């Protein structure tokens, strides 16, 4: 496969992973929302938050930037809100406490906070989204046990254990410049899914389901993210959309995910076909074209030469030739396009200029 790993890594650093500034913004947003929830619950005379649990891409360090030109999409953050079991009421009632608290103290929302099946969701007017899953905990002889408010039920859940499972999987992959390859592959994969979901105006796997699929299908290729991406997509293209997705031994997909997984499988097949073209006698131009189709991003477009730089280069060449100080290789290359008589005149002029300046006038020899 044509080696495009250096460019793919730069794409990851510039357009896939969050910048340090964006990460700082997310931390600030997390703290502000937690303060809103705590203050809102106090004003509503509801129980205090016993604990918070970072979840999703924020906790796993796999958050990504939005697709190019998708002005309505931003990275999101999941923060688990935990109550003591004796304080919590029914699943719906306890979720609604959190919704009311945010609505009471929040601002800048695109819509009012809404209660979903497994969380309270806030979407800001600038596109950022925050999900707040709601838990209750109880102490046992082996430590706290957590249950997630899911619809009308409290369902056993251990988000901290899921974070640890992903961390351990990532740590088994090769390290390049202090970065684990599997974590990068997850980021590439989540960006890829969001990009094609935006392009097709259709849902693709997201969150934990997407993360688990890319872990399941990951192919390690040390030092070559481009090959690792292709072979991981190849494995995805070969799976069935009906095969459940597991993470840490728990099934994390359900019936609603089947069509989303199917779209990812179909897109992976198309991308693998494009990337397989890079196994032949190809160059950078073909590589850029293929990766442009994979990630649908202008980063992979042909670089445009700056007009001012081109003009400056032409002037410098002309000046060097007229003064006789151009490097012999440059002079001979241009001279080859001249007539024999003109070429002889140029060579004589250059020789005379060098003799008049002395042997030190050889800038190309420095």
Image (cartoon, rainbow, N blue to C red):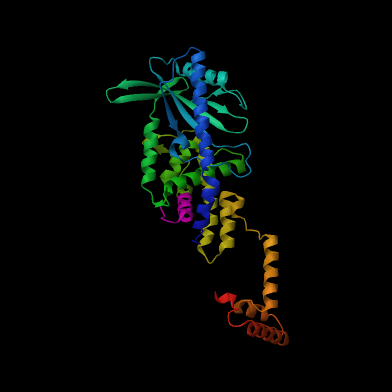
Residue 272, visible in the rendered structure? no
Above or below residue 2? Residue 122 is: above
Q: Nearer the viewer, residue 179 or 283?
A: 179
Q: Is residue 182 left or right of residue 290?
A: left
Find out whether residue 78 is within the magenta segment: no
- Residue 231: x and y, percent? 45, 53
- Residue 46: x and y, percent? 47, 14
- Residue 365: x and y, percent? 55, 76
Where is the C terminus found, in terms of image quarters? bottom right
Residue at image position (55%, 56%) is: 274
Count of numbered circles in the view: 0
Find out whether residue 222 is within the magenta segment: yes
Which residue is situated farthest in the left direction here? 141
Q: Is residue 364 left or right of residue 348?
A: left
Q: In the rendered image, which quarter is residue 249 located in?
A: top left
Q: In the rendered image, which quarter is residue 68 located in?
A: top right
Residue at image position (69%, 80%) is: 337
Principal secondary structure, stretch drawn in magenta: helix
Residue at image position (71%, 65%) is: 311
Q: Is residue 294 left or right of residue 134?
A: right
Q: Nearer the viewer, residue 250 or 100?
A: 100
Residues drawn in magenta: 220-234
- Residue 224: x and y, percent? 45, 56
Residue 183, visible in the rendered structure? yes
Above or below residue 23? Residue 103 is: above
């Amino acid at each position: 496969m044509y080696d495009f790993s250096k460019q793919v890594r730069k794409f990851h650093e510039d357009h896939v992973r969050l910048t340090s500034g964006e990460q700082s913004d997310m931390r600030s947003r997390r703290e502000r929302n937690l303060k809103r929830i705590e203050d809102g619950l106090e004003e509503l005379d509801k129980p205090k938050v016993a604990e918070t649990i970072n979840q999703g891409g924020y906790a796993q360090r796999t958050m990504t930037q939005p697709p190019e030109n998708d002005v309505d999409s931003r990275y999101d953050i999941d923060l688990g809100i935990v109550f003591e079991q004796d304080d919590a009421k029914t699943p719906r009632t306890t979720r609604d406490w959190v919704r009311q608290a945010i609505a009471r103290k929040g601002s800048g929302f695109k819509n009012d906070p809404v209660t979903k099946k497994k969380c309270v969701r806030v979407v800001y007017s600038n596109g950022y989204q925050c999900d707040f899953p709601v838990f209750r905990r109880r102490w046992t002889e082996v430590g706290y046990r957590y249950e997630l408010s899911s619809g009308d039920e409290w369902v056993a859940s251990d988000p901290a254990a899921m974070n640890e499972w992903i961390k351990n999987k990532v740590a088994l992959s090769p390290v390049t410049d202090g970065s684990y390859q599997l974590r990068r592959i997850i980021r590439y994969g989540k960006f890829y899914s969001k990009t094609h979901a935006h392009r097709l105006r259709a849902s693709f796997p997201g969150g934990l389901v997407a993360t688990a699929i890319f872990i399941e299908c990951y192919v390690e290729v040390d030092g070559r993210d481009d090959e690792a991406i292709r072979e991981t997509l190849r494995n995805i293209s070969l799976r069935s959309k009906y095969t459940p997705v597991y993470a840490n031994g728990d099934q994390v997909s359900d019936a609603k995910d089947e069509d989303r997984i199917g779209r990812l499988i179909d897109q992976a097949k198309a991308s693998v076909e494009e990337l397989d073209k890079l196994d032949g006698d190809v160059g950078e131009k073909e590589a850029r074209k293929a990766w442009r189709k994979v990630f649908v991003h202008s980063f992979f477009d042909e670089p445009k030469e700056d007009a001012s730089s081109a003009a400056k280069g032409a002037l410098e060449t002309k000046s060097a030739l007229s003064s006789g100080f151009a490097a012999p290789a440059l002079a001979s290359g241009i001279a080859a396009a001249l007539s024999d008589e003109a070429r002889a005149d140029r060579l004589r002029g250059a020789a005379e200029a060098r003799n008049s300046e002395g042997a030190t006038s050889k800038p190309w020899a420095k």
